[in-house]
Image (cartoon, rainbow, N blue to C red):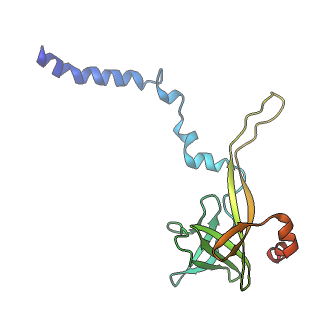
């Protein structure tokens, strides 16, 4: 009897797996790997996760490379290779000879203006908004999208403080960015 179980146990196990994989009662009928893969999902999202449309020139560790800022993941993404995380508050990147980015508290910020006491920063943030089904039959479905939001900060004595729109207009920082 013991040998009988040892011999037929694998046969019983494999026969059960075949019944599960035929599409009836299987998870495969609910899960389509091609439609739920990250690549497929991101391909159908409206908008962009990047602050820059195209790659821009910069120099990192003495090498000229092309990067663009991924505002969704908060990293400088080179055209080839892994992204650059802001691991030190002393990091500064000059993009396209006119755009300075600095690292502070493990996040990338675009430098708007700097004087002796204060540093004014822009933090682009991209949020992912899930797709929505129409609530009624008359309206259309809304696809998933990336939404860019810009937040402004002032850095004084190592303290980062969020600025309000009124303060931005008063300081004229929006005019500096539009140049």
**Which residue appears farthest toward the top when viewing the image?**
1
Q: Position of residue 128 (x, y in %)?
A: 67, 50
Residue in the picture at 24% in, 24% down: 10
**Quadrant position of the C terminus in the picture:** bottom right
- Say whether residue 53 is visible: no
Quick check: 97 left or right of 28? Answer: right
Q: Quadrant of residue 9?
A: top left
Residue in the picture at 80% in, 36% down: 140
Looking at the image, residue 2 lies above or below residue 79 = above
Q: Position of residue 130 (x, y in %)?
A: 68, 43
Looking at the image, residue 99 lies above or below residue 160 = below
How many numbered discs sit on the rendered protein? 0
- Say whether residue 48 is visible: yes
Quick check: 24 left or right of 41? Answer: left
**Quadrant position of the N terminus in the picture:** top left
Residue in the picture at 56% in, 47% down: 38
Q: Position of residue 178 (x, y in %)?
A: 83, 74
Q: Nearer the viewer, residue 12 or 109?
A: 109
Residue in the picture at 70% in, 45% down: 144
Q: Position of residue 26 (x, y in %)?
A: 46, 25
Quick check: 173 left or right of 106? Answer: right
Looking at the image, residue 47 lies above or below residue 83 = above
């Amino acid at each position: 009897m013991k040998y009988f179980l040892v011999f037929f146990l694998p046969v019983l196990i494999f026969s059960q797996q075949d019944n599960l994989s035929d599409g009836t009662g299987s998870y495969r009928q609910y899960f389509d790997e091609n439609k739920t893969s990250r690549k497929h999902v991101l391909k159908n999202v409206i908008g962009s996760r990047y602050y820059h449309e195209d790659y821009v020139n910069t120099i990192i560790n003495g090498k000229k490379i092309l990067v663009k800022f991924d505002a969704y993941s908060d990293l400088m993404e080179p055209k080839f290779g892994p992204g650059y995380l802001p691991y030190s508050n002393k990091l500064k990147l000059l993009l396209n000879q006119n755009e300075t980015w600095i690292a502070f508290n493990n996040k990338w910020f675009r430098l708007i203006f700097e004087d002796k006491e204060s540093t004014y920063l822009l933090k682009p943030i991209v949020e992912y908004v899930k797709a929505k089904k129409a609530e009624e039959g008359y309206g259309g479905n809304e696809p998933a999208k990336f939404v860019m939001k810009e937040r402004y900060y002032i850095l004084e004595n190592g303290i980062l403080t969020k600025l309000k729109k009124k303060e931005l207009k008063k300081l004229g920082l929006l005019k500096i960015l539009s140049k």
